[in-house]
Image (spheres, rainbow, N blue to C red):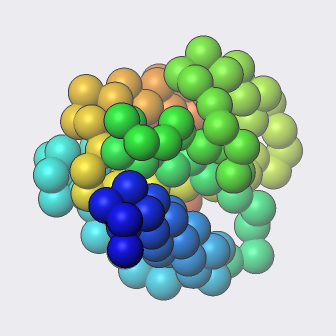
Amino acid sequence: MHPDATDNYRMMWQMFQIAFVATALSWGPVAQASPTCGPRLHGWDQSRVDSAQQVNTVILYDRHHHSPTWNGAPVNADQVRQYLEVTKQMSPQPIFVLIISPNADCHEVDTYRRMASDILKCAPGRCVEANP
C-alpha cells in the first residue's frame, strides 16, 4: 500500500471507531474519561442513565486531522457555544456527550469541557464524558 493510503486508512478506521463509540453511548454503556487530558470535571457522568433521553454529541478528534463534530457535523468552538446556548433553553434538555479521542489536543478538551460546564451547569444526568 502507498504510505498516504495507509495513513488515510488508519484515519478512516479511527473515525469509524469513534463514531461506533458515539452510537454505543446512545445505548448507555459505561465509558471512561479521557486518560490523556485529566479526569472528568465535577458533575460529569461517565455513562448515560436514561438512554431514552435525546443527546447532543461533540467528538474531539486529533485536531491535526479532523475538526470537532456536533452530532456528526463539523463545527468550531463558537458554533458549539451557540448550540449549547440553545440546548440549555430546551425542555427537556438533551444530555450533552463529549467524546474525546486519545489523540485530542488537551487544551481543546479543556476549552470544550469548561464551555459546556459553564453554559449547561453540568450536573449528574446532564453531561457525559467518554473516550473511545
Residue pictured at 42% horizontal, 42% vertical: 65
Number of disc labels: 0
In the rendered image, the quadrant that contains the C terminus is: bottom left
In the depicted structure, whether residue 24 falls above or below residue 65: below
- Front position in the image: 33 or 105: 105
Q: Residue 50 at what x, y percent from top left?
A: 65, 74
Q: Nearer the viewer, residue 92 or 97?
A: 97
Q: Residue 30's quadrant in the figure?
A: bottom left
Percent across and percent down for residue 67 are 52, 36
Closer to us: 85 or 124: 85
Q: Is residue 25 visible?
A: no
**Quarter of the figure with the N terminus:** bottom left
Seen in the picture, residue 99 relative to 104 is either above or below; the reply is below
Q: Residue furthest right?
A: 91
Left/right placement of residue 2 relative to residue 15 reads: left
Do we see residue 73 in this rendering? yes
Q: Position of residue 18 (x, y in %)?
A: 48, 67
Residue at image position (56%, 76%) is 20
x and y percentages locating residue 131 in the rendered image: 35, 63
Camera-nearest residue between 32 and 93 = 32
Q: Is residue 130 left or right of residue 71?
A: left
Question: On the rendered structure, is 123 left or right of 108?
Answer: right
Check the image and report above or below for 25 versus 127. Answer: below
Residue for point 51% across, 50% down: 59
User: Does 13 appear above or below 55?
Assistant: below
| Quadrant of the rendered image containing residue 19 | bottom right
Residue 83, by quadrant, is top right
Q: Is residue 105 left or right of residue 64?
A: left
Q: Residue furthest front?
A: 2
At x 60% / y 16%, what residue is drawn? 78
